[in-house]
Amino acid sequence: MSEDEIARIVVNSGLKVHRALGPGLLESSYEACLIYELKKQGLKVESQKALPVIYNDVTLDVGYRIDIMVEDKFIIELKAVRELTDLHTAQLLTYLKLSQCKLGLLINFNVELFKYGIERVINGYLKVN
């Protein structure tokens, strides 16, 4: 399954969760529901996956955690904040670089319309859906 196919499933699943719950809950609530929806679609999903930093041939566990990793190649970074900032985007960019993944979605569930809470990041470039 391609990263774009995964992205479509993630967006549709996220929309389903957002329609059911709306904005205003904790990030962990959205994460649990989105994981449930993705697993229902038959996807391999890992939650809070450790992401080490490799520096000078030394692997360092410095506490980075990917919110959701799908099919070992797609990262979802979830937020429940007033608005996304450049810092949130930088976080996802760092995770993509460290994991060598090509595509990720930054999703903020604390928005009135779900489409305004999605940022798509590809190989270090930001694209807004």
Image (cartoon, rainbow, N blue to C red):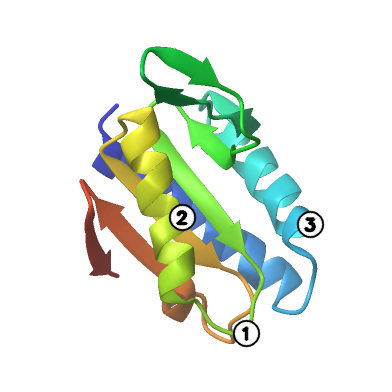
Q: Residue furthest front?
A: 56
Disc 3 on helix, strand or loop? helix
> Nearest the camera: 58 or 65?
58
Q: Residue at x 43, y 42 (%)?
A: 95
91 over 44 or under it: above or below: below
Q: Is residue 24 visible?
A: yes
**For mark 2, what is the residue?**
91
Disc 2 on helix, strand or loop? helix
Q: Nearer the viewer, mark 3 or mark 2?
A: 2
Q: Position of residue 56 (x, y in %)?
A: 36, 18
Q: Nearer the viewer, mark 1 or mark 3?
A: 1
Q: CA distance from mark 3 to mark 2?
A: 21 Å
Image quadrant where one finds the C terminus: bottom left
Q: CA distance from mark 1 to mark 2?
A: 17 Å
**Marks 3,2: beta carbons within 8 A:** no
Q: Quadrant for residue 90, please give it.
A: bottom left
**First-in-chain label (1 vs 2):** 1
Q: CA distance from mark 1 to mark 3?
A: 16 Å
**First-in-chain label (1 vs 3):** 3
Q: Residues within 10 Å of mark 1 (few under 14, many from 20)?
A: few
Q: Please indicate whether residue 124 sits to the left or right of residue 59 in the image.
A: left
> Nearest the camera: 102 or 35?
102
Q: Please indicate whether residue 23 sits to the left or right of residue 5 in the image.
A: right
Q: Residue at x 39, y 47 (%)?
A: 94
Q: Position of residue 117 (x, y in %)?
A: 48, 74
**For mark 1, what is the residue?**
82
What amino acid is at disc 1? Arg
Q: Residue at x 59, y 87 (%)?
A: 112
**For mark 3, what is the residue?**
29
